[in-house]
Amino acid sequence: MKEFYSKIRVKDLAKMFPNRTKATIVAKALSLGLPSAKLWQPEENNILRKYFTKASLKELLKLLPKRSRLAILAQGERLGLKREINKPHLKINESYFKKWSPNMAYILGFIFADGGIVKITKNGCSDKLAFGVNQKDIDILRKIKKELSAKQALSMNDKSVHFAIYSQKIVDNLKKLGVSYRKSFREGPRKKFPTIPKIYIRDFIRGVVDGDGSINFDKKGYPTLSVCGKKNIINFIRDYFLSKFDIYSKVAQGKKNGNYYNLFYIAYRCNSAKTLINHLYNNAFLYLDRKFTLSKQCLKIKIKHRKKKNTS
């Protein structure tokens, strides 16, 4: 403690003493008469008290040229100060979800399916919008990143790619549109579904399909389209397809080990699937490359129509 107390933050020092709390470490240091962060002067502490909460680290470094970034954070912690980190450190269009557009509707649908907003419990920090996909679908996160004018980097591990944006404004706007913390299908049944302008409904549904849907081909080579999600989303998609194309699907509930859970499905095949897939992906602005390619394959398939039985 004598060697490191004046050099590093109490938070980091606590890792060296796992059986001690930050409070006991500070108390022990005071009893030993250890200097705090190389004897901070009263005028320096006054600067911290005045600017630490809202000023950027770059501004604090200018105000305290003799101090390092870590030293400033450590002394702020010792003084009991907390920073308000409710703005993204990197550039991002924080007003993006305030105005409807085809791409905005698509990304909103993708968030309902394969994204989410996360509550951050750390004092002063904003909540975040987070995405995670398989590495083979990295293209969609790159497109979303570009669409949001985001400078935040994608992060990768062995099999997946993640993209996170810390912005309270974006999270609050998404909450107004019906997105809840964590996965949207875990929301309570009373959560209001967003009112989507009719002109953008197909873009919203395409976002849901790209996130939580599938386009496949059966043994005969005929296309199938299926979507899963929370009941209100699935009902919304089912009702839209029924009203626009008179194409119906039963809503099925997920079941595991004999127990039902809060996940629902709709599915279409053959000409019905081909019609819906063409509607969603033809002349689309934003899409997952892999499913867009499947949609093009689907349109090339010729499906024989069943002959109507002669009832006369």
Image (cartoon, rainbow, N blue to C red):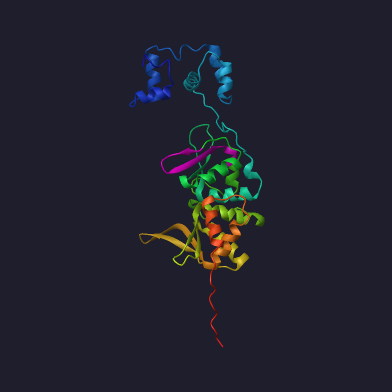
**Residue that protrudes farthest toward the bottom in the picture:** 312
* Residue at screen point 47% across, 42% down: 161
Residue 67 painted magenta? no
- Pick the quarter of the image with the C terminus: bottom right
First to last magenta residue range: 154-171
* Residue at screen point 59% across, 60% down: 278
Residue 52 or 58: which is nearer the viewer?
58
Where is residue 299 drawn, in percent x and y?
A: 56, 62
**In the picture, residue 22 is in which quadrant?**
top left
53 relative to 4, above or below: below
Asked if one can make out residue 239 in the rendered structure from this viewpoint, the answer is no
* Residue at screen point 48% across, 23% down: 77
Where is residue 83 drawn, in percent x and y?
A: 53, 27
Where is residue 6 drawn, in percent x and y?
A: 42, 15
Where is residue 241 drawn, in percent x and y?
A: 58, 63
Residue 169 painted magenta? yes
